[in-house]
Amino acid sequence: MIQLLTVVSRREIAKGATELICRRPDATAIEPGRFMHLRVGPLLRRPISIANVEGDLITFLFKEIGQGTKELARLRAGDQIDALGPLGNGFPVEHVAREAKIVLVGGGIGVPPLYYTMRRLVERGIACEAILGFDTADSVFYEAEFQKLGPTTVTTVDGTAGIAGFVTAALDSSRFDTLFACGPEPMLRSIQQVPVEHKFLSIENRMGCGIGACFACVCPTPDGHYVKTCSDGPVFRAEEVIL
């Protein structure tokens, strides 16, 4: 569904990272882990994960990487965005047992969809922990917001904040039976090897159409086939994909 989102607020939340809160024309529920395909000017749409939903307000967190995200970061209150979505399949928060022991692991711009996911799990009465990985202290964002939901550990590659190293340095797999993760491909490959019974990965991938028509975002599977990140995912069981 194409809709016009109206920008309510925009702020820088870390070096090169922006929080954009928009009002949408309806207040229907959105599954955590889904994304919107946003158009900025004449450029191709950009897939941006949904970081939070409160009534008719939707929050996006993103890093300024290319021209499209730089244009998004320049928007002001009152500006409108042509949005397609919500798209894709998200994390199965409604199917997780209440007694599950859950850890959410995010790396960099893979952190945003995990905030809404953790919030929804906590609302169901499920205790969760989060591990958030960043490059440096000045790139850390939403740590306080996650801490309000549950125990949160930050790691930085250069050791300037939290635990030095990658997210796996802070992960004690023996304490959990379910893992939700989103982040760069090398991180997700490492997560695939972590001995946790149930692992769900949200894959970051370049997309063209966002609806499964162009086959620009395919990912191989162990049985020799392919899945489309945009329409079959972006969330998959860890054993379903080859990264």
Image (tube, grey):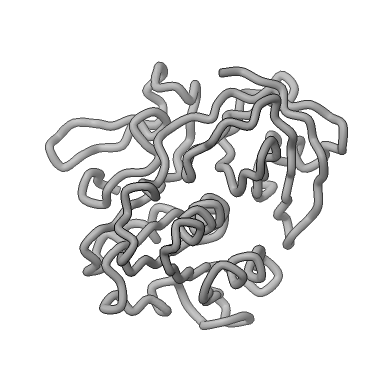
State the residue in front, 240 or 197. 197
Q: Residue at x 37, y 43 (%)?
A: 235
Give how far across and how far down residue 170 sits, in percent: 42, 79
* Residue 180 to residue 134: above or below: above
Q: Is residue 239 left or right of residue 202?
A: left
Residue, far left = 223
Q: Is residue 211 visible?
A: yes
* Residue 232 to residue 94: above or below: above
Q: Quadrant of the N terminus?
A: top right
Q: Is residue 141 left or right of residue 125?
A: right
Q: How many marks?
A: 0
Q: Is residue 155 visible?
A: no
Q: Residue at x 50, y 53 (%)?
A: 120
State the residue in front, 79 or 184. 79
* Residue 203 to residue 42: above or below: below
Give how far across and how far down residue 155 sits, in percent: 53, 75
State the residue in front, 128 or 186. 128
Quarter occupied by residue 225: top left
Q: Residue at x 48, y 29 (%)?
A: 87
Give how far across and how far down residue 58 sits, in percent: 66, 40
Give how far across and how far down residue 28 sits, in percent: 57, 31
Q: Residue at x 42, y 31 (%)?
A: 230
Quarter occupied by residue 137: bottom right
